[in-house]
Amino acid sequence: MTWKHLSLSVTGKSHSARNEPGQDYCRAGALRFSDRDYFVGLAADGAGSTSLGGVGAGIACETLYARILDAIRGGETLPTDPDTSAVKAWISECRDAVAARAAADGQPLREYACTLIGVVATEGYLLCFQVGDGCIVTGDGTGYRTVFWPEQGEYANTTFFITDDAFLEHIKTESGTTTPAEIAIFTDGIQNLVLSFSTRTVHEGFFRPLFAALRKNPENGFVDLSRHLRALLSSDDVNARSDDDKTLVLAVNQP
């Protein structure tokens, strides 16, 4: 199989109105190793209550992306349920990298707080993991499901971060041997637009045309589709429903 993917982050009005940078970050890629094609997708959302959450999100994604590629190229056995020790070790490395940056900057670690969501997929293997809110949605050609429901804290608009002392308690993992035809990863700026919280279901009408467009394009890095998606996520209609940063990673596999 081969993978096509597209990813982007759009700064929400809550930040752009104050001339602030966005605090979301994503990293995605496809690689071929030992005659197998892998997709790796990551997204992170810096805490809105912090000044450097976006920095933390970027460090977390880049650190973990490099670590996963090292694992694949090094022939490491990728994590499977119920063994989550490798995933915990990966996310601990991300946290250590963020903590090192905080120490170098002379800032408290909490200022770099961020969520983290990730997917590793290849033929006959799927690994999903998450800390905090946002969501992973997978499709099998007939319908869509959420892998984990967004985890929120005790109070409204709160969640959990990799910088929390108890971050290990909030790492969710799921693995399996069935590779989905379609994968979407997104941060909480999109989740209220594409998920029904009353029924815990996915608004399939949002994803179907995007996956169809991605599948029709001949290569990754699609300028027209990326421009269209950025315009959609930055539209007045979408901003009226969510003024937060919005990150979306899409991937489709083709036999």
Image (cartoon, rainbow, N blue to C red):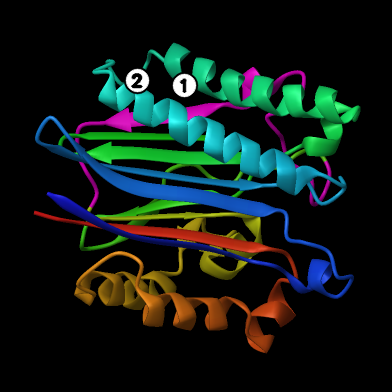
Going from the N terminus, do you reach mark 2 or mark 1 first? Answer: 2
Horizontal side, residue 232 vs residue 152: left or right: left
What residue did someone put label 2 on? 79
Q: Quadrant of residue 173?
A: top left
The x, y position of residue 209, in whole percent, is: 33, 78
Q: Quadrant of residue 176?
A: top left
**Amino acid type at image mark 1:** Val
Q: Residue furthest front?
A: 104
What span is in magenta?
155-180
How far is mark 2 from mark 1, CA to CA?
7 Å
Q: From what the image shows, is residue 80 above or below residue 34?
A: above
* Residue 132 appears in the figure: no
Identify which residue, 38 or 31, lies in the foreground. Answer: 31
**Predominant secondary structure, magenta span:** loop
* Residue 183 appears in the figure: yes
SS of the residue under disc 1: helix
Horizontal side, residue 45 vs residue 221: left or right: right
- Circles 2 and 1, Cβ within 8 Å, touching? The answer is yes
Identify which residue, 174 or 111, lies in the foreground. Answer: 111
Horizontal side, residue 252 vs residue 225: left or right: left
The x, y position of residue 54, in whole percent, is: 73, 48
Residue at 78 percent across and 74 percent down: it is: 13
**Amino acid type at image mark 2:** Pro
Q: From what the image shows, is residue 32 above or below residue 227?
A: above
SS of the residue under disc 2: loop
Residue 87 marker: 1
Residue at 39 percent across and 70 percent down: it is: 207
The x, y position of residue 247, in whole percent, is: 57, 60
Other-residue count near label 2 (Cα within 10 Å), few / some / many at <14 / 14–19 / ≥20: many
